[in-house]
Amino acid sequence: MPNRVIILKIYRTLLKIIVHKPVSDRLGRSEPRVRKRRPKAYLLMLQPRAVLRKIAVTA
């Protein structure tokens, strides 16, 4: 498994490089931390999908 060890070393090195790279400030851009859509009023799936399909067809 020497390939796995090499890949792990490369991965760690890449992460170290990424951490030290500064991210510039993007002027005129704001990213609000909110939900994009309102939650829908669906019930939870408490039965298998096949069973629910049969119920929906017969209803």
Image: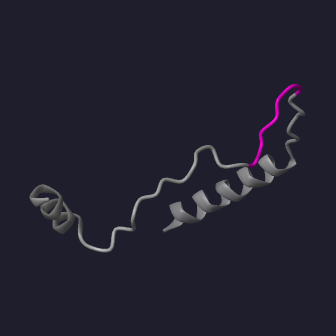
Q: Position of residue 24 (x, y in %)?
A: 88, 34
Q: Position of residue 3 (x, y in %)?
A: 52, 60
The front one of 23 and 18 is 23
Q: Position of residue 43 (x, y in %)?
A: 39, 65
Question: Residue 56 in magenta?
Answer: no
Left or right: residue 39 compared with residue 11: left
Q: In percent of the image, x 82 and y 30: which residue is there?
A: 29
Q: Which residues are magenta?
A: 27-33
Q: Quadrant of residue 27?
A: top right
Left or right: residue 44 compared with residue 19: left
Q: Is residue 7 above or below residue 17?
A: below
Q: Position of residue 35 (x, y in %)?
A: 65, 49
Q: How is the image coloured?
A: one colour
Q: Quadrant of residue 9?
A: bottom right
Q: In percent of the image, x 9 and y 60: which residue is there?
A: 58
The front one of 24 and 15 is 24
Q: In percent of the image, x 87 and y 48: which residue is there?
A: 20
Left or right: residue 30 compared with residue 14: right
- Which secondary structure type mostly characterizes the magenta part of the structure? loop
